[in-house]
Image (cartoon, rainbow, N blue to C red):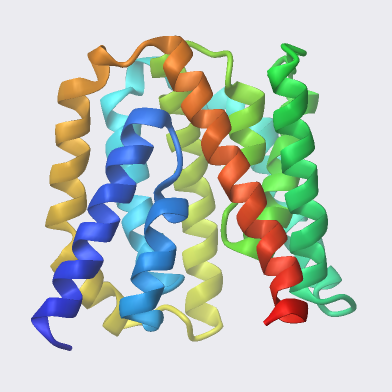
Amino acid sequence: MDTQTLVFCALALAAGCFVQSTVGFGMAIVAAPIVYFFEPRFVPGTITLVGLVLALINMWQYRAMLSIKGLGAAFVGRVPGTMIAGWLLLYISSQSLALVLGIGVLLAVAISLLNIRIKPTNTSLFWAGFASGLMGTSTSIGGPPMALVLQHAEAAKLRANLAGYFAFSCVLSLVALTFTGHFSWWHFKYGMLIMPAPVLATLFAYRIQHLIKAEWLRYALLLLCSVSGVIAIWQGVSPYWV
């Protein structure tokens, strides 16, 4: 692989990690389309590896605010959500499922803008994890359901618990990708080669987080959720337009 491709992919992942470390999620939304353009083989395996390292770094950074017990319901919901999405994809196209879920995310964003609060109870976290499993399996972007449930949390707590959830999700995804042949030593090797740029971007994000107001953080989160919903809808309708 040529050096230029590695550099562009590293910069794209660095930008994504910077966004996720400041907002709480968004690495895949920012980086995946750019990385796919330069090196399609990095999607999803290498991106998921970077996402796991990022989540672990953020978990450590915000460890004082992390609530593994509180995320238990989301972890439980993620597993059947992923399994049911896999089962649904045997009978309906990934495009159809992405379209429905994208519309659902945009509706949830609209409800959030009306200041209707969804409290992070065990029930809501379970269904957020379930929806995340569905969306992550069909569109590769599973963050919005969890982000919407946790959006009113304190900034550090939001970042900590999203990081904890993403670490769990990335481990599940890497196991599945390994067994299906989509993650190998090749993906790991190149992932490690480009890892310094995302890590440095993450460390830089920590230096400027104090400049970001809580209200800005919430609206940035809702914007990223909206973008992910639009991307999912586009994935659903593009086969009929292109």
Depth order, front residue of 139/52: 139
Image-quadrant location for residue 22: top left
User: Compared to 2, does 68 lie above or below?
Assistant: above
Question: Residue at 57% across / 61% down in the picture?
Answer: 140
Depth order, front residue of 110/80: 110
User: Compared to 33, does 167 lie above or below?
Assistant: above
Q: Locate residue 110 relative to residue 30 in the image: left or right.
A: right
- For residue 3, say whether it is visible: yes
- What quarter of the picture does the C terminus occupy? bottom right
Q: Position of residue 40 (x, y in %)?
A: 40, 81
Depth order, front residue of 133/21: 21
Question: Residue at 47% across / 81% down in the picture?
Answer: 182
Q: Position of residue 239 (x, y in %)?
A: 72, 80
The residue furthest front is 241
Question: Residue at 43% across / 11% down in the picture?
Answer: 214
Q: Position of residue 193 (x, y in %)?
A: 14, 69
- What quarter of the picture does the N terminus occupy? bottom left
Question: Residue at 58% across / 14% down in the picture?
Answer: 152
- For residue 67, say whether it is visible: no
Image-quadrant location for residue 8: bottom left
Q: Position of residue 241 (x, y in %)?
A: 73, 78
Q: How many marks?
A: 0
